[in-house]
Image (cartoon, rainbow, N blue to C red):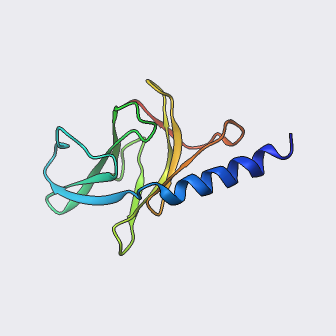
Amino acid sequence: MRFLKPLRRAWEWLTGRWRKQLRVIDVAGDELPKSLCRDQVIRLIDDGEEWSAGMLCPCGCGDTIELMLLRGVKPRWNLTVDREMRPTLHPSVWRSVGCKSHFWVREGRVVWVTPMTQAGSSVDA
């Protein structure tokens, strides 16, 4: 069983190289667009303050995930964006309904959490 973990990491690394990276798109307003693209994270900005991020669930179920970015709300995520507009989210996204996906977004890539390393905040989306 010791060989499964390195094998899984190698597979994720190989498949991740061909997968499109996520990019952040800034949108003014307080509502996510009706249709989202798979490779985009929408950052909603209202009165100069970022308050929400939205994306399609990366598992392919088609559900929209909306994450709060405002200080003082719970649960809350931090969204950092690099020069190439690649997002990093902290903590992980752990869906408590629907597909129950659990993943990190790091430098524009989705990193799936294995059952052995469950940590993060959940979101009902």
Expressed as whole percent of the image width and height from the top left, the position of residue 17 reads 53, 60
Q: Quadrant of the N terminus?
A: top right
Expressed as whole percent of the image width and height from the top left, the position of residue 105 reads 48, 53
Q: Is residue 40 above or below residue 114?
A: below
Expressed as whole percent of the image width and height from the top left, the position of residue 85 reads 33, 67
Q: Is residue 42 left or right of residue 31?
A: right
Which quadrant of the structure image shows residue 115? top right
Q: Quadrant of the C terminus?
A: top left
Q: Is residue 40 left or right of residue 120?
A: left
In this view, the residue farthest toward the right is 2
Q: Foreground: 38 or 107? A: 38
Q: Foreground: 47 or 35? A: 35
Q: Residue at x 76, y 47 (%)?
A: 5
Q: Is residue 71 left or right of residue 92?
A: left
Q: Foreground: 51 or 22? A: 22
Q: Residue at x 20, y 40 (%)?
A: 35
